[in-house]
Every structure is written in C-alpha cells, then in structure tokens.
Image (tube, rainbow, N blue to C red):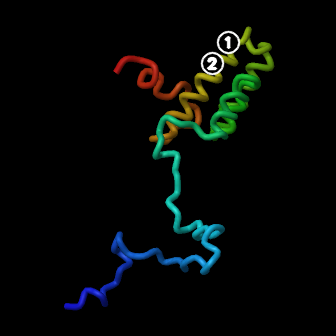
Amino acid sequence: MNDQNQDNSQNDWAAPSHEPPPAGNFKDYRPPQDHLPQQSHQNNPGSMTTDQIIALVLSFLIPGVGQIMMGQTAKGLVILAAAIVTGCGGGLISIASVIDAFLLIKAKEYRQVGDWEFFPDFNQTFGSK
C-alpha cells in the first residue's frame, strides 16, 4: 500500500491547508485567521473577560446592571428598583449586587443559571469543600 496517496486531512503532521507565504515578502505574511488556534476563556478558568469586569464595576456603581449584563434582566431590574427606592441601602445593596454578579459569572462558566437564582454556588466558591 502506498502511504503517499492517503488523505492527510486527519494527520496532525500534515502541512497547513492555506497557501504558503509569497516569495520574498515573508516578514509581513500572516496566515489566514481561521487556521490559527483560537484562545478561549475555557482554557484559563480563573480569568475574566473585559465584559465581565465591566459588569462587576457597573454592578457596584449601579446595583442590578451587572445582573442585566449577564442575562438576568428581570432580577437586575428588581435590584435596580430596590436600590433606587432605598438609596442603595447604605451601600449594602451595592456590595450584595457585586457579590451576586461575581458568583453569577463564576457559575455560568460551567452550568446554566436560573433567571432568579441569587448568589449561585456561594458555599462552593467561598465556603468549605
């Protein structure tokens, strides 16, 4: 059997499928983006994206906005209304909103979170194991 005629699409050692760089202009060549390995948030589970950091900061400044940004719109609006009515409850609503948004971000990394779930996986994140 001749190995040279086999399909190399499943072979990790096969040459890339994109065109080689143009001759004499290798310095400025960049391969097509669809052939580059994609970095995903899942590779570094402890890191947070810029959107998640913005959601936490806004959740402190305007309680409920972080929850709205993370997909819990009704819950975020209720927290925002409670913050407006109580004048942020002496800052306690802001602190609770940030903690809830942080736990929401962490829980969404590995599971679905309910629309009205408050402080998801609090004991798992902050408590003993």
Q: CA distance from mark 2 to mark 1?
A: 6 Å
Splitting the image into 4 quarters, where does residue 15 fall? bottom left
Residue at image coords 56%, 26%: 118
Secondary structure state at the residue bearing disc 1: helix
Q: Is residue 79 in view?
A: no
- Horizontal and vertical percent for residue 75? 65, 31
Splitting the image into 4 quarters, where does residue 60 fall? top right
Q: Residue furthest left?
A: 1
Q: Quadrant of the C terminus?
A: top left
Q: Residue furthest top?
A: 90
Q: Nearer the viewer, residue 16 or 66?
A: 16
- Residue that label 2 marks: 96
Q: Nearer the viewer, residue 70 or 82?
A: 70
- Residue 32, relative to residue 126: is it above or below? below
Splitting the image into 4 quarters, where does residue 91 fall? top right
Residue at image coords 55%, 80%: 19
Q: Amino acid at mark 2?
A: Ala
* Residue 11 left/right relative to 50: left
Q: Nearer the viewer, residue 19 or 60?
A: 19
Q: Are marks 2 and 1 in contact (CB under 8 Å)?
A: yes
Q: Nearer the viewer, residue 49 or 68?
A: 49
- Horizontal and vertical percent for residue 6? 30, 86
Secondary structure state at the residue bearing disc 2: helix
- Residue that label 1 marks: 92
- Horizontal and vertical percent for residue 108? 52, 39
Q: Amino acid at mark 1?
A: Leu
Q: Quadrant of the N terminus?
A: bottom left
